[in-house]
Amino acid sequence: MTILVTGCAGFIGFHVAKALLARGDTVLGIDDLNPYYDVRLKAARLARLSGLSGFHFQRADIAEPGMIATAAAAHPGIERIVHLAAQAGVRYSLEAPRQYIHANIAGYLEVLEFARNLGTCRHLVYASSSSVYGASAALPFDEADRADQPLSLYAATKRANELMAHAYAHLFGVPATGLRFFTVYGPWGRPDMAYFTFARAILEGRPITVYDHGRPRRDFTYIDDIVAGVIGCLDRPPAAGDMPRLLNIGNHRAETVGRLIGLLEAALGRRAVVRAAPRPRADTPATCARLDRIAALSGFAPTTTLAEGIPRFAEWFKTWHAEPAEQDEEFMQRSVA
């Protein structure tokens, strides 16, 4: 089976593509390698995918009209799409709002148009976010809860994606499933995420900024559990004529940021230097996913606790931090520049 994975050099996209290749699928990966965070990390992920049988890569900006179809022209028979390319980050959307409209709205429109015209598309699975729930205080978050009061432009673009999927299913029969990701962490993660920035600062002896004394709670979800959930949903397309599904994908545990910091300190063998600050207005106080719907569909049952996942991340991170992959920088210049 040939599967299109957008954002294949990103954190989740890399792991999903690797898992699909491991089971024998052919993967066409698209990524524009934008410099929102260290491109060496994206190149390092991509270098590992490029050594695997069945992987094909195209560097492209999916928001450019027709670019996806051009990239896919040499790969007929695409049956499924995993759309993970996006401009990520809640706080950055306050600084660069146009990048979110370009990548998350215009880019997603091009994905929908490609799926609509493909002819062979049996399922589009795309990334939404727990951010769509806004400041809801009712935990755990349920897919039936209100999602019309976003706290950031990032959240607004993800809710817009869900509504666009509904319109394309109604008008053109595009079969889609939106996954509302909660806080995903693990090896090869995103450097803009709190656990990653905390780990770097702790190792370097720099202070970390901790909001609201570490009381905010997050549903931290380990990457291997996320991959199992994504692929489990991908393999179960909606029935013909069904409206798109919206599913939480998380860990069903709300852990404090303070506990996260304590686990990082233990795994890295160093104490954090903490600088207190008030919680930003764009941040949700707490998140926790109700998982009944995704469990009923695919049997999704996350198994990795934060106490298990953070040491695995820390083990990878210490190696990456010490040797930020000079060979992968060379690969980037040679293959994807």
Image: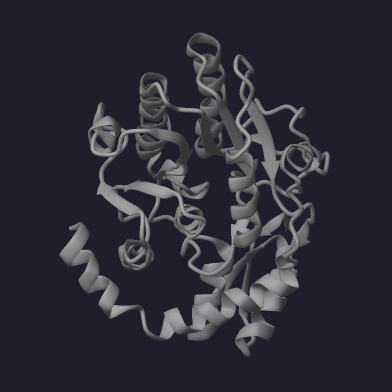
Say above or below: 236 vs 44.
above
The percent position of residue 303, horizontal first and vertical second, equals: 75, 62
Residue drawn 41% across the image and 37% down it: 100
Q: Is residue 104 left or right of residue 296?
A: left
The percent position of residue 174, horizontal first and vertical second, equals: 50, 20
Residue drawn 52% across the image and 56% down it: 23
Residue drawn 63% across the image and 40% down it: 233
Res. 211 image quadrant: bottom right
Say above or below: 322 vs 101.
below
Q: Nearer the viewer, residue 125 or 194?
A: 125
The percent position of residue 246, horizontal first and vertical second, equals: 66, 31
Quadrant containing the C terminus in the rendered view:
bottom left
Q: Is residue 206 visible?
A: no
Q: Is residue 111 visible?
A: yes
The percent position of residue 127, horizontal first and vertical second, equals: 54, 40
Which residue is situated farthest in the bottom direction here?
Answer: 269
